[in-house]
Image: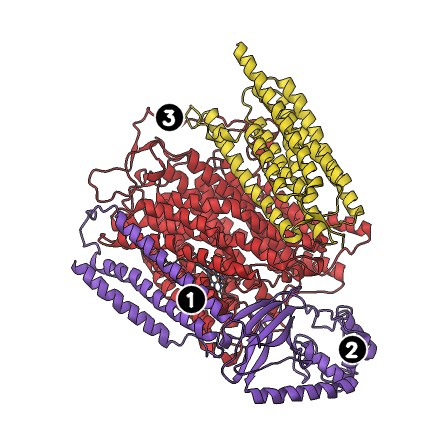
């Protein structure tokens, strides 16, 4: 009997210690969406349960190891206890009940975080190797950053141009894959103003680690101001070839591989690209002119600059005018 | 003595009876497909056919027969073990085909590829008849009739070869002609993958038949004839797979225009 | 003395062969592509293949495994050349950066695997049977260590072959982990940079290849490791002379060797960047390395399928007299449960990889949305195997825990029936939960909640095991030699892993956890607790049975006390950074996240684990020759194999035994589990020629 009392106390102590320890470690990042609340609540419940179950197993084990250790010189066996059906039934039925409760809570939790607000703001998201594009259909704006107003439910309608990607902002908790050929949806309601990052969570090739874009949650007023600015910018850009080119570059994530400041990247930098003499993989050299650039955008593998053999730039289906616009933009980078 | 002969006769007679059932069901299946296009009925018919083959041709109940001899090194005991091993292998293999079926259902749903249904019925008939002769051959070997075994196995082999040629050299070009190509879309992909995997199994089955035929001719199986049974069971298994694949590819669902 | 000689000459030949292969490859590459590529794939492939073959030549001569490897190399080249010739005749492209085109590599690799099997001699008996020639049931093996390098039909030899191969693969996979962990020790790219070049890959690509291969090589090593334990122990525990199908047993082992070679080839031939899961569309675009990966897994899968078929047949047919189901040792129950999964589900990973392979080769659009395919279908097929597979990994390990605990606490296993049935329960429920890996995948929404329920159900039979173990320990007279330490460590570690499972299962929480290091922490815990620790326990425990000597206790304890705390630090760290936002499968992380210190600590822990494994390996090989002699019932166990002297003779028990009691009745005075029949009665050991059955020749 004494043994059981001590172990009982141990279980309580270990549970509390484990829970307090885990809780104070600050495991979860900042909760910045209204979906984070229910998720963190369920997670916390799970941490409590885990602490308890851990203690339930570890306490009697550790106690036995110390108290029931074989004494020196004792060569006899222990008491012959084969089992106890009532106990077995108990520890089958009680966990069964527990997991069913968790499943029930989990289903409710899931329903809660997926609650639909009919007035949600729609943003179309496209993922591709290795960048994000965000379109605001009502305003006709396209951006490589996600700006959203605080307190408003956002409905992301997402797809991919190439392989699987996954939209994840750790502070918002929820996550959803982007699948080529179909549209997947994700809803969240940002609640804390600040700047975060969407980080691609599904491996998508060489630069998967760098497939990140800023996510900016601002007040409704700031958001509207940003949107107005974007609309104006889009109009301005549409007027000149360089401007259109710049918009295309931004919308297609070229910057993920090509820097515009001379920094080394996955692809050659664009700074001073026009007119530069490049050495190709077969040893020949070319002077970068409009024809060469056109070819390189249309058929990236045709001529590869030495040092970039393994980077398979995807083929974008740009029209000739679009390519001309992009070249016009690159020419401005010197 | 006479009862023994009668028993042999009745075994062969049973084979014929089962074959008639199977043939009628296959015709019925075709009829259902053409006139009712009822998926449920087609599934039921296929299941009935499969059960008939499993029980009467593949003798699945033999698994449960305890060999009277519990001496683990006796031929009877080892045969029981071999039998179990073969069935385990077939269970494992059927997961591949089940997976292919899932793929077909997922990609095509209630549509079917643009294929010649009559041609499909033709090759199906070849395989079905081959199963019948296989059963005869096996039964005869079991009864010590080596000559009968050799003849029937040879017929089985030729029919199987006919099936293989029919699928690979008639069906496939025909499908391609109809616009169902491997790289053209889900229908071609599913069709070529499923028939290809099945044809591969038919091919291995033919090799086994050839082996037991050659060894049987040498008189190797006059007493210990489990290898004959094994080859036969494998052959019937390939037939069972086709019992499901045939309706899945040729009968179930509506035609869609080829993309 | 001969042995020492041959090890040194083998190492020398490894270097020499590697150098020659490198030179040949460089030359061929030069001829084909016109440039000298010192870090290229072709040179490395030749160096790898010729070096390894030369190594075994030095060790063992031109027979057995050496001949297999040589044939594999030749077969691969011939197959590749054949297809290249056909392609040339058809006017298609022929040679490229990887020497052959992709179809040529695929066919070459297949021909290579088949050639290996013929070369090593794993099918020579079947070939004879097919020609109607009888072969004797048993072959006498060579004496000494040499029998391990050629085909043997003895389940004990095969068990040890499996085990040692598994250890080799764990070392290779672990080494890969240590390499990529070194890169992760700090944010930014340190040595796997964009300008780094190896095997036609740059730094991040090499990271992805190493990470993916770490996963799959480790998984293959687990499959081999459990096969090793099951092969060695199950016939002994059953009182059988051997497995039901000794030739198929040998075959199953020997196909795993070319599979391992293919996995390594995949790294060399451009690697692949998909993770071990190989999801399309990414895997449909990866370099040709992924085809070698697919073929390697496919081949290893056959090993697993045939091995488990054999286990089931053995357990059903070859039990000792009196051993009815409820008197079988728990390890046997666990092996059956594992084998049921491996026998059936494995086909689905093979199929899923085969479909991607065909999509690449023939443009069949199974998973290509542009051709009406469905990428999510792949995930269903893949996880239909790969979830149940995780229970394949652990069930034998949990069986080892249940098997060894009673021996070291001197008390019966608490609730034998419940523990036995819980293995089957886990295996069966395990078939119904696969989509819990796909909560964020975009699959049909209505599937999420049912899969949450089914997933959580697995906790119940697993819990039964835990509570029964605790009750077994409670009130026992506990001893803690090395095997018992690893058993206790296994329980603790697996508890951590298991308890981190249900949070993933609740969908909403998994939306946060999915594809983070929390998952990585979860499965390292479950895998170490369910496989690695019990595997070490089993090795320390049965080592004396196999060799007649025991492993060094002191170094065994060092191994344990070094590995366990480091391991806890490693996985706690993983879970910690995972929750705070660390994604999986990334070569670099944002320094702003502040994970640098945690990662540094994890890397150091990883090194310490590696060091402890190294200590184990040295102890293992040293003790074979120099360990303390232990020929009797070292652990004072009731199990039949310990009632006869070690090492076990070639055909196991000279006299058969009969089961007369319960397996774990420790503490019941006068009880016995087995009784050896007096010589002369019973069936005895007979040597009857095998029937000319061709039961296996269809594979
Ligand atoms: C050996 C392997 C192993 C084992 C045993 C398990 C066991 C379990 N796993 Fe794990 N899992 C993996 C290996 C394993 N897993 C791997 C490799 C992955 C990642 C794959 C990849 O993407 O690469 C993964 C991923 C994974 C996911 C997907 C995560 C994601 O990617 O989003 C999920 C989701 O449900 C999950 C759940 C579980 C559950 C519920 C169990 C349960 O079986 C655990 C049951 C045990 C216990 C619960 C503890 C003991 C029980 C008690 C003490 C009783 C009382 C308990 C309760 C009442 C809760 N696992
Ligand atoms: C058996 C299974 C197993 C084992 C034992 C391990 C062991 C280890 N694992 Fe692994 N791991 C996986 C299975 C396993 N892992 C899987 C399935 C994945 C998922 C892959 C994916 O995402 O696709 C993964 C992924 C994975 C990641 C995530 C990578 C990423 O997402 O980017 C990390 C990161 O830290 C990691 C680390 C480690 C470490 C440090 C060890 C250490 O324990 C290793 C210790 C070292 C050794 C055991 C080697 C010791 C031997 C020697 C030193 C001798 C060498 C000598 C010669 C070769 C001659 N593993
Ligand atoms: Cu996109 Cu990872
Ligand atoms: Cu799982």
Please tell me which residue lies in front, C514 or C213: C514
How many other residues sit within 10 Å of disc 1, few (<14), some (14-19) or many (≥20)?
many
Q: Is residue B91 above or below residue C270?
A: above
Have a look at marks 2 and 1 and say if they share a chain.
Answer: no
Tell me the residue that label 1 is attached to.
C571
Figure chain in red: C
Q: CA distance from mark 3 to mark 1?
A: 53 Å
Residue at mark 3: C683
Q: Same chain, marks 2 and 3?
A: no
Spatial CA span between label 2 and label 3: 86 Å
**Which one is nearer the viewer's eye here, C294 or A321?**
A321
* Separation of marks 2 and 1 at Cα, in angstroms: 50 Å
Chain letter, yellow in picture = B
Q: Secondary structure at mark 3?
A: loop
Q: Do callouts 2 and 1 mark residues in contact (Cβ within 8 Å)?
A: no
Q: Which of label 2 and label 3 is nearer to you?
A: 2
Chain A tint as drawn: purple
In this rendering, is residue C664 above or below C473? above
Q: Which mark is residue C647?
A: none
């Amino acid at each position: 009997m004494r043994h059981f009392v001590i172990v009982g106390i141990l279980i309580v102590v270990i549970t509390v210690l484990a829970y307090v320890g885990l809780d104070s470690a600050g495991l979860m990042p900042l909760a910045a969406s209204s979906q984070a609340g229910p998720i963190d609540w369920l997670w916390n419940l799970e941490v409590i349960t885990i602490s308890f179950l851990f203690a339930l197993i570890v306490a009697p084990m550790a106690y036995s190891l110390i108290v029931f250790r074989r004494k020196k010189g004792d060569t006899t066996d222990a008491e012959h206890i084969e089992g106890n059906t009532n106990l077995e039934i108990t520890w089958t039925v009680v966990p069964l009940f527990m997991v069913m409760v968790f499943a029930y809570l989990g289903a409710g939790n899931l329903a809660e975080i997926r609650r639909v607000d009919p007035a949600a703001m729609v943003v179309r998201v496209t993922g591709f190797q290795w960048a994000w594009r965000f379109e605001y259909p009502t305003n006709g704006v396209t951006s490589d950053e996600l700006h959203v107003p605080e307190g408003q439910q956002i409905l992301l309608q997402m797809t991919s141009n190439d392989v699987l990607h996954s939209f994840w902002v750790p502070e918002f908790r929820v996550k959803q894959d982007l699948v080529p050929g179909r549209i997947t949806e994700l809803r969240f309601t940002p609640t804390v103003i600040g700047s975060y990052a969407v980080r691609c969570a599904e491996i998508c090739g060489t630069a998967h680690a760098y497939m990140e874009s800023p996510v900016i949650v601002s007040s409704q007023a700031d958001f509207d101001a940003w949107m107005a600015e974007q609309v104006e910018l889009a109009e301005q850009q549409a007027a000149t070839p360089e401007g259109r080119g710049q918009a295309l570059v931004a919308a297609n994530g070229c910057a993920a591989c090509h820097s515009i400041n001379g920094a080394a990247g996955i692809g050659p930098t664009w700074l001073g690209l026009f007119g530069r003499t490049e050495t190709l993989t077969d040893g020949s050299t070319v002077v970068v002119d409009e024809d060469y650039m056109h070819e390189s955008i249309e058929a990236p593998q045709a001529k590869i600059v030495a040092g970039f053999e393994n980077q398979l730039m995807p083929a974008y289906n740009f029209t000739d005018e679009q390519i001309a616009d992009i070249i016009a933009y690159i020419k401005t980078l010197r | 003595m006479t009862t023994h002969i009668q028993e042999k006769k009745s075994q062969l007679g049973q084979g014929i009876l089962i074959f008639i059932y199977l043939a009628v069901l296959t015709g019925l299946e075709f009829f259902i497909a053409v006139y009712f296009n009822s998926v449920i009925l087609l599934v039921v018919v296929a299941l009935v056919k499969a059960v008939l083959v499993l029980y009467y041709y593949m003798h699945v109940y033999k698994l449960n027969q305890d060999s009277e001899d519990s001496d683990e090194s006796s031929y009877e005991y080892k045969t029981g073990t071999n039998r179990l091993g073969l069935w385990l292998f077939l269970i494992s293999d059927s997961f591949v085909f089940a997976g292919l079926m899932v793929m077909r259902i997922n990609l095509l749903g209630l549509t079917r590829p643009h294929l010649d249904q009559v041609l499909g019925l033709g090759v199906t008939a070849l395989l079905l008849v081959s199963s019948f002769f296989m059963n005869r051959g096996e039964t005869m070997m079991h009864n010590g009739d080596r000559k009968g075994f050799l003849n029937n196995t040879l017929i089985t082999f030729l029919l199987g070869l006919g099936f293989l040629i029919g699928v690979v050299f008639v069906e496939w070009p025909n499908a391609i002609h109809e616009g169902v190509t491997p790289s053209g879309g889900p229908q071609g992909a599913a069709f070529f993958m499923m028939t290809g995997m099945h044809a591969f199994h038919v091919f291995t089955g033919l090799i086994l038949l050839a082996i037991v035929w050659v060894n049987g001719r040498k008189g190797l199986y006059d007493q210990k004839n489990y290898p004959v049974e094994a080859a036969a069971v494998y052959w019937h298994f390939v037939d069972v797979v086709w019992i499901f694949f045939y309706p899945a590819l040729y009968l179930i669902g509506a035609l869609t225009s080829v993309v | 003395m001969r042995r020492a000689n041959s090890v040194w000459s083998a190492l020398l030949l490894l270097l020499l062969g590697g150098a020659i292969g490198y030179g040949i490859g460089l030359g061929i590459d030069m001829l084909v592509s016109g440039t000298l590529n010192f870090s290229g794939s072709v040179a490395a492939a030749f160096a790898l293949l010729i070096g390894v073959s030369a190594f075994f030549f030095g060790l063992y001569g031109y027979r057995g495994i050496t001949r297999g490897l040589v044939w594999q190399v030749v077969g691969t080249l011939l197959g590749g050349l054949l297809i290249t010739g056909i392609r040339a005749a058809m006017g298609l492209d022929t040679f490229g950066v990887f020497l052959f085109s992709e179809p040529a590599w695929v066919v070459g690799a297949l021909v290579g695997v088949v050639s290996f099997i013929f070369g090593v001699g794993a099918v020579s008996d079947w070939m004879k049977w097919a020609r109607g020639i009888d072969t004797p049931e048993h072959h006498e093996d060579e004496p000494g260590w040499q029998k391990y390098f050629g085909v043997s039909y003895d389940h004990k030899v095969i068990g040890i072959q499996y085990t040692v191969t598994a250890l080799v693969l764990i070392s290779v996979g672990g080494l890969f982990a240590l390499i990529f962990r070194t890169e992760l020790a700090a944010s930014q790219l340190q040595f796997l940079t964009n300008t780094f070049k190896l095997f036609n890959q740059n730094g991040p690509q090499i990271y992805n290849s190493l990470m993916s291969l770490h996963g799959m090589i480790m998984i293959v090593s687990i499959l081999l490791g459990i096969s090793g334990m099951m092969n060695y122990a199950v016939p002994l525990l059953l009182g059988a002379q051997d497995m039901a199908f000794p030739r198929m047993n040998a075959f199953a082992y020997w196909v795993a060797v070319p599979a391992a070679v293919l996995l390594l080839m995949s790294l060399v031939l451009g690697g692949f960047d998909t993770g071990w899961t190989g999801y399309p569309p990414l895997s449909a675009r990866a370099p040709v390395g992924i085809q070698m990966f697919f073929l390697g897994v496919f081949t290893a899968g056959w090993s697993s399928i045939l091995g488990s078929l054999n286990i089931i047949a053995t357990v059903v047919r070859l039990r000792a007299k009196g051993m009815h189901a409820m008197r079988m040792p728990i390890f046997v129950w666990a092996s059956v449960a594992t084998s049921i999964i491996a026998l059936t589900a494995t086909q689905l990973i093979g199929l899923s990889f085969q479909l991607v392979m065909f999509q690449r080769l023939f443009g069949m659009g199974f998973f290509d949305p542009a051709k009406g395919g469905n990428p999510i279908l792949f995930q269903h097929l893949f996880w239909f195997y790969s979830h149940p597979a995780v229970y394949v990994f652990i069930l034998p390990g949990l069986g080892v825990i249940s098997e060894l605990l009673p021996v070291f606490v001197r008390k019966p296993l608490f609730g034998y029936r419940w523990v036995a049935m819980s293995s089957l329960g886990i295996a069966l429920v395990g078939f119904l939960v696969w989509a819990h890996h796909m909560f964020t995948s975009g699959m049909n929404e209505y599937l999420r909640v049912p899969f949450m329920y089914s997933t959580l159900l697995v906790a119940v039979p697993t819990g039964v095991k835990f509570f029964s173990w605790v009750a077994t320990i409670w009130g026992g007279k506990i001893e803690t030699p090395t095997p018992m330490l690893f058993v206790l460590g296994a329980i603790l570690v697996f508890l951590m892993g298991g308890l981190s499972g249900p949070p993933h299962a609740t969908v909403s929480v998994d939306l946060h956890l999915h594809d983070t290091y929390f998952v990585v922490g979860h499965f390292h815990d479950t895998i170490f607790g369910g496989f690695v620790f019990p595997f070490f326990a089993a090795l320390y425990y049965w080592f004396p049975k196999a060799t007649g000597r025991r492993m060094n206790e002191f170094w065994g304890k060092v191994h344990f006390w070094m590995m366990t705390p480091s391991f806890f630090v490693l996985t706690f760290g993983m879970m910690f950074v995972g929750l705070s936002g660390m994604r999986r499968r990334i070569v670099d992380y944002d320094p702003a996240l502040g994970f640098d210190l945690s990662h540094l600590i994890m890397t150091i822990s990883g090194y310490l684990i590696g060091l402890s494994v190294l200590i184990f390996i040295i102890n293992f090989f040293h003790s074979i020759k120099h360990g303390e002699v232990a020929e009797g019932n070292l652990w004072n166990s009731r199990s039949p194999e310990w009632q006869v002297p070690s090492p076990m003779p070639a055909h196991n028990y000279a006299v058969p035994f009969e089961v007369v009691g319960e397996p774990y009745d420790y503490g019941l005075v006068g009880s016995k589990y087995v009784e050896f029949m007096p010589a002369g009665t019973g069936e005895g050991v007979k040597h009857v020629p095998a029937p000319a059955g061709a039961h296996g020749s269809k594979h």
